[in-house]
Image: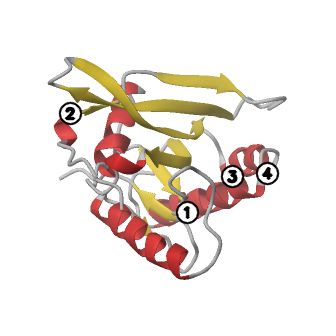
Amino acid sequence: MMNRIKVDPATVWIETVSIARIGDDQEDVLRAFQADVMIHDAEAGELTRIGAVQGLIAFESTEVELAMAADAISTEALALAHAADEIRRSLDKYAQATPSTVLLVDLIRIKPQWRGSRICGHVISQLLEVLRLDPEATLVVLEPEPQFEDGGRMRKGPQRTAALASLRETYVEAGFGKWHRGPVWWRLEVAA
């Protein structure tokens, strides 16, 4: 068993985010993003990379635009886009503000020794802050998928089941909720 390092969320930062155009997205609906998750090491007086967040971002997209652009990328992106559109329709139906920006998070990877500190919510908040996105107008969707410590998705079995339960608990603590009976989870901050 690896020794885990306890992390104070106040020391976790996202300094930079790379955003890139995707292939031949004619409508320019989605952009790929990648952000390094850093921690301030007070003893060393420097920032250390402990992980990354990557996915897709859509600004001011319609349902059709988002679904078509995501479908051109992957089935995983399409599943997240469909869920995001359902969530936006549901919010609109109940006269709540409909989010104008959508983050389709493909992966949040934290190095093994830094896991277990429940920093996911802080990482997402930092990402929104660096991108200058309003948390109340930005819908974040993802599908919890456990990864092996050295990367790669786990196959079905007891190890994956336990890892998925832990990951879901992490996302609940980070402010995410499960969308209906599907595999997608979502987060949208609501004004107090």
Residue that carries the numbered disc 1 in the rendered image:
145
Q: Is residue 154 left or right of residue 110?
A: right
Write down the quadrant of residue 131 in the picture.
top left
Residue extending farthest top = 45
Q: Which residue: 35% across, 56% down? A: 2
Nearer to us: label 4 or label 2: 2
Mark closest to the chain's N terminus, 4 or 3: 4
What amino acid type should be assigned to the residue bearing mark 2?
Answer: Thr
CA gap, disc 4 to disc 3?
7 Å
Q: Is mark 3 on a helix, strand or loop?
A: helix
Residue that carries the numbered disc 3 in the rendered image:
77
Q: In this view, does 107 lie to the left or right of 2?
A: right
What amino acid type should be assigned to the residue bearing mark 4?
Answer: Asp
**Closer to the camera in the image, 109 or 16:** 109
Badge 2 local density, few (<14 within 10 Å), some, or many (20+)? few
Mark closest to the chain's N terminus, 1 or 4: 4
What amino acid type should be assigned to the residue bearing mark 3?
Answer: Ala
Q: How far from the left and from the top, in percent, is residue 155?
A: 65, 71
**Closer to the camera in the image, 160 or 44:** 44
Q: Is mark 2 on a helix, strand or loop?
A: helix
Q: How far from the left and from the top, in percent, is residue 172?
A: 33, 66
Indicate whether 38 appears above or below 54.
above
Mark closest to the chain's N terminus, 3 or 2: 2
Q: What element carries label 1?
A: loop
What amino acid type should be assigned to the residue bearing mark 1?
Answer: Glu
Residue that carries the numbered disc 4 in the rendered image:
71
> Do tag 4 and tag 3 residues touch (Cβ < 8 Å)?
yes
Quadrant in which the N terminus appears:
bottom left
Asked whether the viewer can see residue 3, the reply is yes
